[in-house]
Amino acid sequence: MLEEVKVPPLSLEAYGEVAGEEAVSEIRRLAEPLRGARILHVNATKFGGGVAEILPTLTGLMRDVGLEAEWRLMPGNDQFFNVTKLVHNGLQGMDVSLDQAKRHTYDEASRRFADAFEGDYDYVVIHDPQPAALRSLRPNATGKWVWRCHIDLTAANPDVWGFVRPMVEAYDAAIFTLPDYVMPDLRVGVLAFIPPSIDPLSPKNMPLESALLDDVLFRLGVDPHRPLLLQVSRFDPWKDPKGVIQVYRAVKREIPDVQLSLVGSMASDDPEGWRIYRDILRYAGQDPDLTIMTNLDGVGALEVNAFQRASDVVLQKSLREGFGLTVSEALWKGVPVVGGKVGGIPMQIGDDVAGRLVTTNEQATRACLELLRNDGLRTSLGEAGKERVRRNFLSTRNLRDYLLLFNALRTGDASLVPQGTIV
């Protein structure tokens, strides 16, 4: 069997205060005809990255509303994950080479994973490219199979997409974050659009006392009484960490007290992360006001929460971004975001509703200076951002959308398929 990830029990009722009782009632209603259905989520890692952030809450809440939900991992080694990282980068537009040897590595590993797959399910959700081949390798498996793409495909490498597309077309449905991500030659039965979500009650997003914020920052070498710019992300070239450092240095010429923290996590399915991390350390040089830390430095969910709440501006200056959960995390904490005008970031920030959208370092520098110099503007953007997340990007909305899709697949009613509408 594929490795099962243990998920703590959750109660949907606990989310009523933040999401609203109407949202809880709607979820209960949608779950009733699905009661007892067996649900399986499969991805490649249980920590590091947005998918691993989403699945514990989604699986736990599915169980609470009467579904028999599981979350399992496909095991892999560095050789396999080096190939899938190439696939990931290629799907996001990088010019990579996926030669026959690399394709063979992917195919052979996928066959081993398919042989390890056991059990009958009503709905199987396969997340991202790593396990994408499972459906085509198990064509007689029971249930409806859904491929969930968390990647921005707007500039996908044609060769890499050509490798992945036949696998995706074996599914009954596919979920994307945005319609722009759907490649025009994709042929799949049902297309759904579901933005990712954050768990407002998790240790990463729950309220914290101000004294605890100060303690965490002091312990990790940051002065909580001076301006703080922050980026939280994997160590990945698409997150443009060097560009963030360049923006910080430009801001510091005008506001000498400003600090920058880069907080990242190392994912088991991303061997490239260590190389990027070491490269960033060299690029940052010796600057006491620039801290770079990872989950291996004792920076867990609570510490990330503290840094986000204590920051004045969060930077998410990505070059490609499927969604960017850290944007919603910051907005939920009332902190404005200066984000790249790419992928799923604009749908979170809106048109200057919760921060600033930028395309260059110069624009990002001006936006940071504007926000650091205007307390009232930061407050108003932060308040608007928190409300935008409450309406659109909480776990309850994500759960509702999955239930809608499962009901659409169960009944054939296309009107139930979620379309990712932002309110």
Image (cartoon, rainbow, N blue to C red):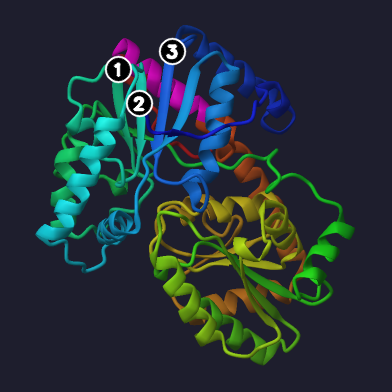
**Which residues are the magenta region?**
399-412
Picture quadrant of residue 171 = top left
According to the picture, the residue beneath numbered tag 1 turns out to be 143
Numbered tag placed on residue 37 in the rendering = 3
Q: Which amino acid type is shown beneath numbered disc 3?
A: Ala
Give the side of residue 58 with respect to residue 226, left or right: left
Could you tell me which secondary element the residue under label 3 belongs to? loop
Give the side of residue 24 with respect to residue 320, left or right: right
> Which sits in the foreground, 367 or 335?
335
Could you tell me which secondary element the residue under label 2 belongs to? strand
Check if mark 2's residue and mark 1's residue have beta carbons within 8 Å: yes
In the rendered image, residue 276, in percent from the top left (x then y), is placed at 44, 73
According to the picture, the residue beneath numbered tag 2 turns out to be 124
**Earlier-in-chain disc, 2 versus 1:** 2
Q: Does the magenta-highlighted stretch encompass residue 409?
A: yes
Question: How far apart are the two marked residues, 2 and 3, measured between alpha carbons?
Answer: 11 Å
Q: Is residue 239 above or below residue 350?
A: below
